[in-house]
Image (spheres, rainbow, N blue to C red):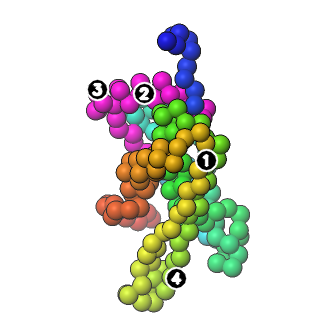
Amino acid sequence: MLSPIMKRIVNDIDVDAIEAFVADASANPENATLEFGVTTRWTGQLRSESRPAPIVMGNGETIDRDFAITADEPEQIFGSNEAPNPQELLLAALNACMTVGYVAGAANRGISLSKLEIETRGTLDLRGFFGLSDAVPPGYPALEYVVRIAGDGTAEQFAEIHAEVQATSPNFDNLARAVRLNATLQVEG
């Protein structure tokens, strides 16, 4: 038995803390929610800067976030190539969210990872973005991704984690199904 001050750390994750967090979410569903937000401002040319709002937890606790996420386009697409473009940020957000799932899933099983890499690709047809064809959607028709994972788990355990990530990753779900977007336009004078 572990002493009260000993923690189970796997992949730099406090497994006991995750288990306690999950147990609280199960016992108190009102604590299981997290509200996220960002405000994005145009900063010139095709650049923008997004600043996250505090994360609001279901129990009312707020987590302050103090950093900027910049976006830009390459010069060939009329930007200044100073930051990732929105598509790269979207794919990075998908990969980062799935990474959390793979690392936590492995840690919960006591599996130490030695490698985790996710490569995601998609092709946009800009005729949709430019409104040149109603038959061409402005977004991706499909995304392809490859997960490269290694550690002291079995192939079966990694397959379980892979299926678990596909079933529970918020950003995987956000992209795999249509998410309703409720828009409000405020024209200021």
Task: Report the side of 120 relative to 156 (left or right).
Answer: right
Q: Which residue is mark 2?
A: 19
Check disc 2 and report its element: helix, strand or loop: helix
Queried whether the magenta region covers residue 19, the answer comes back as yes
Q: Which residue is mark 1?
A: 150
Residue type, mark 4 in image: Leu
Q: Which residue is mark 3?
A: 27
Queried whether the magenta region covers residue 27, the answer comes back as yes
Residue type, mark 1 in image: Ala
Give the CA distance from mark 4 to mark 1. Answer: 37 Å
Percent position of residue 133, x then y: 42, 89
Q: Nearer the viewer, mark 3 or mark 2?
A: 2
For marks 3 and 2 on the same chain, the one whose residue lies earlier in the sequence: 2
Q: Residues within 10 Å of mark 1 (few under 14, many from 20)?
A: some
**Residue shown at the point (41%, 36%) measured from the top left:** 56
**Residue shown at the point (48%, 40%) measured from the top left:** 105
